[in-house]
Amino acid sequence: MLAIESKESRRRRRRRRRRKKKKKREESMESGKKEDGEMEKVEFDASEIEYVSYGGEHHLPLVMNLVDQELSEPYSIFTYRYFVYLWPQLSFLAFHKGKCVGTVVCKMGEHRNTFRGYIAMLVVIKPYRGRGIATELVTRSIKVMMESGCEEVTLEAEVTNKGALALYGRLGFIRAKRLFHYYLNGVDAFRLKLLFPRPELHPSLPMMADKYESHMRSYHGNAPSIVE
Amino acid sequence: MADEAATVAPHASIPSGDNSVWADVSPLLQAASQDLQEGELIHGDNFNLFAAMSALEIMDPKMDSGMVCTYYSLDEAIENGAAPVPISEDKTIDVRCTIDIMDHLLACEATWHKGHSLAQTVYACLYLLRPERTSSHALLHSYCKVIRATCNAILSVVSDARTHEEEDLFTMAYGLPLCGDGDEKCLSLLNAVEETISRQLRACKASSSKRRVSEDIEPLQDNSDLEEGYCRALLCRLRFRKHFYHLLMSMKRPQGRGLELARKHIASCISEIDHIQKSSEFLRTSAYGMCDQNIDTTASGCQPIGFDASLNCRLSAPTPPRSIKILCWEKALEYFIKLLQDLDIVCSYSLDPSLEAALHFVVKFQKSQPDLVSRAHLQLLLVQDGKLYGRDSMLSMITRAAGLPEVTENHDIEKNEFMMQLGQLVINLLKILCTNTAWQRRKLGKMLQDWRVIYVQLEMAFKKKFEEASTTSNTKKICFKIYQHILAWVEEKTYWIAFRFLSLGFELELYSFHDYCMVYWYIYVVLIKLAEKKHLRMAMSSDAAKKKAKKKKDSLKDAEMDHHIPAAVLFLQSQIYLAEGLSMMFAAMRNEHRIVPLQSPFNTEHEIFIQQFELLQKACVPDHISYVTFKESTSHANLSTLAICDYFKEAQRIAKEVKSSFANDSDTMAELRGVEQVAERNSIALNVCRVGALDPKLKISFAFSHHPFFATAIVKRS
């Protein structure tokens, strides 16, 4: 059931929620690193992971379960639907032998005269971390954003989340800002930004796509760890 | 039943109007809902993230803040005995519990200062929420009063300073009784209570030492073995509050008139904190066996009575339904000591009537990473009524900083609209420098454009004025002077801001290793401009001063001064070499494949450059600088040529030389030492790299061990 809050509190809650959400996402990635010792890693070949674009209502419970499972606080169904209904092409799921093991949820739109993408949620369940699944998921979303005419992509990450920062750093994101006490636990965040090349600066844009292909090949070839 | 009630009630309360009539819409809604498919609502144009995030699932404890409450109202909590007055009929227990409340309140206060909501920290105390309830309990009443008054005072300082942009939870105080009746007179009650307890302490000491029963004075509590300890524990807590409140009041006085007095109260506060710390052993032992003693927010370890943070979740709706971790008692005391030390630095400032001194002071102050409360106090001291320290007009400060000769003082320069804007810009700069460094950097970056615009506007205005002035009069000359000096100063300040913007990026960890080459290169070009403008401005000032001196008497030293580069410029010179050296070192290592450049699948180094320096480029700081110029100057760097032209050696030499000029300036001395050390180590590292060029086992890394933003190279054989 839906309740409408006062304008003031809604404004604030919206901010808080966003913070919480981000925080949780990063926490979940972070925790994978810490619990590596206790956690049984699943043995699998990178080629066994199947990546699927968001396909409709039957995928929604999978996305929600995955996020709920990794995050202690659930989000309202409206938040999930907001993203996956408006930008289904930006959401991806990763399956291993029929089991959903990771997902990415994004949006894109006008922001201060630029058309920008925004990465909202990224989750890979613990036993599957460190094998490039998160990188592949987020890379697929970014590629669609680029093809859809986005000029840049943004997101926030906790300053202590070295794994996520390294992942996005490798993809060309810079730390544009530090957001003081962004999370309720008092931890700062980085606003990360990825600027796409403008055609007038790079006459040979198709080259970027080739680069992307070879980059992905190298990822699958060596399967370097994402979360350090 | 419910449906009926819903449809009947409006009929009863709101009558139908002339053009309207009440109708039951339930069947309509039901029919409509048949048409609506799952998820369709989300397709609505007006359904945005705002709406999605605002949606609440009622009765879900994680979303519905009302669900996690122990009590539904303050009245219910009080009726249930959550905050009894007195806390206990047993006087000893009552005193012990009062001390626990005091300790927990202190921990809450520190947690609030650290950025949590007032409602869920200090005002989780039920006693604070109903000021009149404690009136029969003088001790608790006086303490609650002074806490409310203190919170109120701090809140107003922080909101007045507006340095809390990202710390906005701090000033939220919806519906909280911040100011109880007579809270402004909190000190008189506090003094009376303090007086009573110090008499009780005297009495118990007299009775124990001389075995003489002291008449008239009723002891604090009934256990004579604990009397002295409890009296002492209470006294230091009360006195801390008294001095802390006095301190805040003294700092509030205009034009920094109360700073000296404030320092005395700071010293008293610190000494009372010492007593508070020492009281913990007594409090722990005396409470032994009376409670679980597993709480870390009180000295005794006992759970404080009368706190319920969940109650305020509903009192102040915007607070998210999350439990806040209150700082532990020791950490709270540490926080207050740090706050007092920071405030002491503020109070010890000489209020030097010079803009450069004020700017220098804020930057130095920020190095100790002060928290919000002390930063707000500094800001209010620096800028009052649009004047520096509430005393010196900004324009006179600017003309003085620009080194304008006194002849221009009566000139109508102050009437110039752009000069007024410049004054406002300087005020903004001072305020921005008082904010947390993350926010500060963003604001400084955005501000660069304003400085650039004001420069252009001033230039045009002065030109016009110059042309208007008659050729014969002296005005023309004066006009030209003002024109030169002010513009040179504005440019110098613009590059100073740019330099701070770039160097703060290191402190905030915004740069990745791969960006260091371009960042140091940009610092290098900005520093060159800064040194150039500073030199020009200083030469003009000394020129003006010299002419004035010459009129009085011929100085022999003039000739020497002419060719001497000022120490401040030489200091910049050493940093220029260091920045250039670092940039070239990174470039050489990349050119010789010692470091692998980042290979992003989506963009190139060019985009990284655009993003990193977007705000500087927008403001043309400096002019004609682009990615192409960066590439041109770094693409040929290699280790063997670097050794011939060793920037690090130059930096080290200048830093060493210029030290003697700063013998009395410990901060600049420390910075110079840092520059010298980094330069020396990097010079050695560079040589090792060059000699061992073919050794693949040489690993090079960088650390900020000697300077906050100039990296020191570390070469290791792996």
Image (spheres, rainbow, N blue to C red):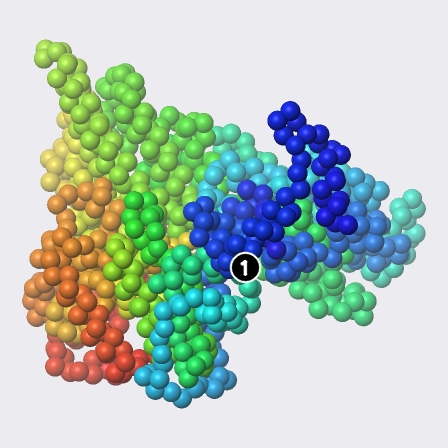
Image coordinates of residue B25 in percent, x first then y, are: 63, 43
Q: Is residue B709 left or right of residue B540?
A: right
Quarter of the image with the C terminus of chain B is bottom left
Chain containing the residue with disc 1: A
Whether B9 is drawn above or below A88: the answer is above
Q: Is residue B711 left or right of residue B306?
A: left
Residue at the location (20% across, 31% down)?
B456
Q: Nearer the viewer, residue B328 or A183?
A: A183
Residue at the location (81% across, 67% down)?
B290
Image coordinates of residue B691 in percent, x first then y, are: 12, 77
The three-letter amino acid code for the residue at tag 1 is Ser
The residue where tag 1 is placed is A76
Is residue B53 at least partly visible in the picture? no
Whether B414 is drawn above or below B562: the answer is above
SS for callout 1: loop
Residue at the location (71% across, 56% down)?
B69
Q: Nearer the viewer, residue B222 or B597?
A: B597
Residue at the location (61% across, 42% down)?
B173
Image coordinates of residue A51 in percent, x first then y, are: 35, 75
Count residues near mark 1 (Cα–Cα under 10 Å), then give few for <14, some for 14-19, many for 20+. some
Q: Nearer the viewer, residue B350 or B82?
A: B82
